[in-house]
Amino acid sequence: MKEFERAGERSLLSLVEHKEAGGKVAGVYCLFAPTELVRAAGAIPVSLCGKKEAPISAAEKTLPPNLCPLIKSSYGYAVTDTCPYFGASDFILGETTCDGKKKMFELMGRIKPLHLMHLPFDADGGQALAFWVQEMIRLKGFLEEQTGRSVEVRELNRQIKLQNEVRKLLWQISRFSRAETVPLSGLDMMTVMETKSSCSDLEAYAVLLRQLIKELEERCAAGVAVHRRGAPRILFTGCPVGTGSEKVLQLIEECGGVIVSMENCTGIKGQDLLVEEDTADPLQALARRYLRIPCSCMTPNEERLNLIRGLVEDYRVQGVVDLTWQCCHTYNVESFVVREFIETRHGLPSLHIETDYSSSDTEQLRTRIEAFLELIA
Amino acid sequence: MSGLESVAGIDIGSRSIELVVFEGTRQIRQMKVPTTYDPLAQCEKLLDGMRVGRVVATGYGRKLFIESLRGIEVSAITEIQAYALGARYLFPEVRTVLDIGGQDTKVILLAPHGRVAKFEMNDRCAAGTGKFLEFMATALQIPLEAFGEFALRSDKRIQINSMCTVFAESEATSLMARGERAENIAMGLHLAIVQRTVGMLRRVGMEPPLVFAGGVAHNPCAGKVLEEQLNISLIIPDHPDMVGAIGAALHGMAGAKERGTRCDRKS
Ligand code: SF4
Ligand code: SF4
């Protein structure tokens, strides 16, 4: 685990080396950004999603306070220039996933070169795929222009394989938590997943993941658990979380629950989706895969419920905690469907929490989470 | 001194701290003090000179309390569980518990056999809680204890639209400026919090009988308007603010003991 905690520093160093050798760095904000394509063009993608409270007040000079903290934090980092990854980024990839983000990107575009991918809002419609393929082609053009390197089919297919490999490893790691004794806490799981979005070298990351798998196998064989016996098994879903915005995750584990799965973006959402390998038209393959990400900005978004169903059953989940960042309308509205699905379809209790990055409501949240766990125990 | 072990339940809320002591199954003591800025000192005062074998804490200060107490068996449960246990002890047939306290409003639905089936709690905002009424009573310069009676003297129902405490105050001010009677404004403010509460009750799928507990249950106007809107009669305990402390004590009694506590676990 320590390796993962240190990975941040190391990746910053290698980004610097990469840049010194003339390479480019792309700042990305969302799971919809096709990182295979970015890498195939010779740039390293780093995730810039704002997870910390600190830069929010600076963002509020420009953005309305009544906005999702993730957007404010992301923008705050950009204007205060306090995120080294933002500083290292040569250009930014944005996507029109939600209204707040897409309008924020217009402002961010004043600071760095920014390419906006337009997203269709339904995954199945006949026009959607064709449109999204066009967006992939447009992105390819932008990347090639920025890096001065053209994207070769062979290289793109290689990157696809590599990403798939990493996804499979992450999927494998998360599956350890299906056991009676869970060997990795939700917080540690988050750290492992997060490392992916800032690492420069995917192959090295895969090595780390394989090491972790060994370690987890040993822990499992020795019956090591990160929780006390009978701890309620919780599925965590909703908006993205990460270091700095993990308060709800942390409270769940502090209060005695064990997070067996994280469905959200920074968790398993999309890690089970692989891109078809070795096709003649890998852009098509990418488009097909990325369109299937079950994000709440898609309508309809039944795939999310399917994913949740699978996780609930596989991981023997006893309760679901659904997190919405304040003013995230898509996840907030969808929380009704999620709750209904969990309660009526699975007969399980669910808890919906709406909050932001501040710690002002920690005690209230603790009461609600503890009571929720009491209800399960 | 009898050979029975005594168990104390202490409910450390944002506005007041309640203590009850049971000896065997008999409640032998009940006390209440304001929370003040130093809740721990207040707790110590309450427990001073008392010989109790075990203390179960609930309410906002529960964590702080069990961390500070040494040499005595302490544990903690949430207010949700405490109110459920307390209300069921006082009224075995209860199915829904409403607790409007100083900072929170909670609605708890019990399964027929008495366990908590579902609950709702307001988020960080104090709209719809005792705090809201307290704030508004101060704004209208009426003592909080008399605010309910005062509102009952209204002769017309006006709608206050803002649920935010700060905005509601400016709404009340502008109503006063228009010459509206203070009694009617007070009634409007009560209606506003009741409407919010009714929404929460509907969301958990409220079932009668409904026990109304917590400090705001002392307010006659809140109770009356709730009954009107829900079209049922409420059960209000003699000491509605003691329900949490009673539930905590009950949790500490034999049988419930092994269930233990969560928040005393060091993370
Ligand atoms: S929740 Fe949706 S919009 Fe947000 S990062 Fe994930 S995929 Fe992107
Ligand atoms: S959490 Fe919601 S509002 Fe915030 S950026 Fe993601 S989709 Fe947009």
Image (cartoon, rainbow, N blue to C red):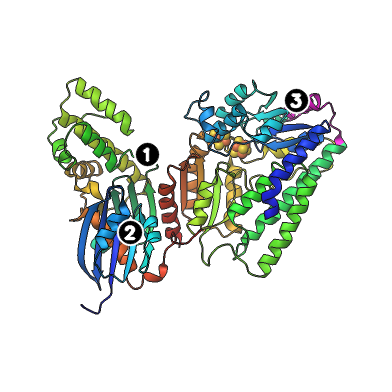
**Residue B182: x, y in percent?**
16, 29
Q: Residues within 10 Å of mark 3 (few under 14, many from 20)?
A: some
Segment tinted magenta in the rendering? A133-153
Residue topped by disc 3: A138
Q: What amino acid type should be assigned to the residue bearing mark 1? A: Cys
Disc 1 C-beta below 8 A from ligand 2: no
Mark toward the start of the polypeptide (1 vs 2): 2
Residue A41 appears in the picture as rendered: no
**Residue B102: x, y in percent?**
29, 45
Residue B125's mark? Answer: 1
Q: Is residue B229 above or below residue A91?
A: below
Q: Which of A143 and B205 is in front in this view?
A: A143
Residue topped by disc 2: B82
Q: How crowded is mark 2: few (under 14 residues within 10 Å), some or many (20 or more)?
A: many
Residue in the image at 20% along x and 24% along y? B176
Q: Are marks 1 and 3 on the same chain?
A: no
Disc 2 C-beta below 8 A from ligand 2: no
Element carrying mark 2: helix
Mark pair 1, 3: CA separation: 45 Å
Residue in the image at 19% along x and 55% along y? B239
Q: Nearer the viewer, residue A9 or B204?
A: A9
Q: Is residue A107 above or below residue B166?
A: above
Which of the image's four quarters has the C terminus of chain A? bottom left
Chain letter of mark 1 equals B
Quadrant of the rendered structure where residue B163 is?
A: top left
Element carrying mark 3: helix
Q: Are marks 1 and 2 on the same chain?
A: yes
Q: What amino acid type should be assigned to the residue bearing mark 3? A: Arg
